[in-house]
Image: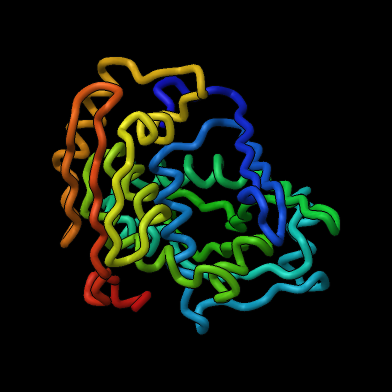
Amino acid sequence: MPANRRARREIIHNSPPGSTNPYRLEIICPWELDADDESVLMALLAIMAPADRRKTVRGGSKIRSILKEEGVRMDDDILAAVATRHEILTLLGWGTNGRSYDRLNECFRRLENTNIHYLNPEGSQFSRLIAIHRKLLGPGERDSNITILLNRLSAAVIAGNTNAGMAVQWIAERRSLNSQISQILYSRFVLLLREGQERTIRVTVLAQSVFALSDDQTATPDQWRALTASLKSFAPAGWKVSLVGRGDSAKATVFRPKSPKSLLPPSVR
């Protein structure tokens, strides 16, 4: 959650030590991403999750030819789905005024310019995180169909090859959180905890993740107060968070309930 968005950032994620399938994931961002970008990516994944909403795009398709002309590199097996900005904004719960459309388009630009480099012992893959094909709107036009395209790695999640459908479960609960810090905390918690699980986490670890701090950085007093306030007020349906200790010794015990299907918007149930 950058206070002042830096011009470039690389995020490196390696497989756990001793993994039977070692890999290295490099995410290259021209600008730092924030909670809005994370929410939009989850919404796009949720829209694409139902099988009848998506199709596989092959190398010879018209949309692939257009993307190639535009200089967009995507690998061979990608998924595509059609939606409108209005549908995406409704799913996000941002409202549908002009400012919300501008906010969404800014997220599109940052996400489209984010690249993924995936390496394993067999070689490497390089592609855009996501591509969004849309037409130029005329005077007075606000919306039209857009085509969302996901690279192979992201498509594997939606197709059910890894942790299928997680974004579908996340987006509805995340909508109920008003602050960016709470939304980022939510994203970290759903990655760390299975449904029905409780876990204790050091607050300093959460601060590093939420504020993208390096190992030699510590949260400022203002960041620390904002983080602890968000933890104390963190209350999506059924979630429980309790804080123990102060300063560097503070710990948060988090319980994640099972996500009821009723939380999901009808379009993605």
| Rendered residue at 34%/60% (across/down) | 171
Q: Is residue 129 above or below residue 195?
A: above
In this view, the residue farthest toward the bottom is 52
| Rendered residue at 39%/41% (across/down) | 35
Color scheme of the displayed model:
rainbow
Residue 192 location, x and y as percent?
40, 53
The answer to whether residue 252 is left or right of residue 6 is: left
Residue 78 sits in which quadrant? bottom right
Q: Is residue 93 above or below residue 57?
A: above
| Rendered residue at 35%/20% (across/down) | 219
The answer to whether residue 75 is left or right of residue 235 is: right
Residue 214 location, x and y as percent?
51, 24
Residue 115 location, x and y as percent?
67, 44
In this view, the residue farthest toward the front is 18
The answer to whether residue 2 is left or right of residue 114 is: left
| Rendered residue at 52%/47% (across/down) | 108
Q: Depth check: 219 or 78 in front?
A: 219
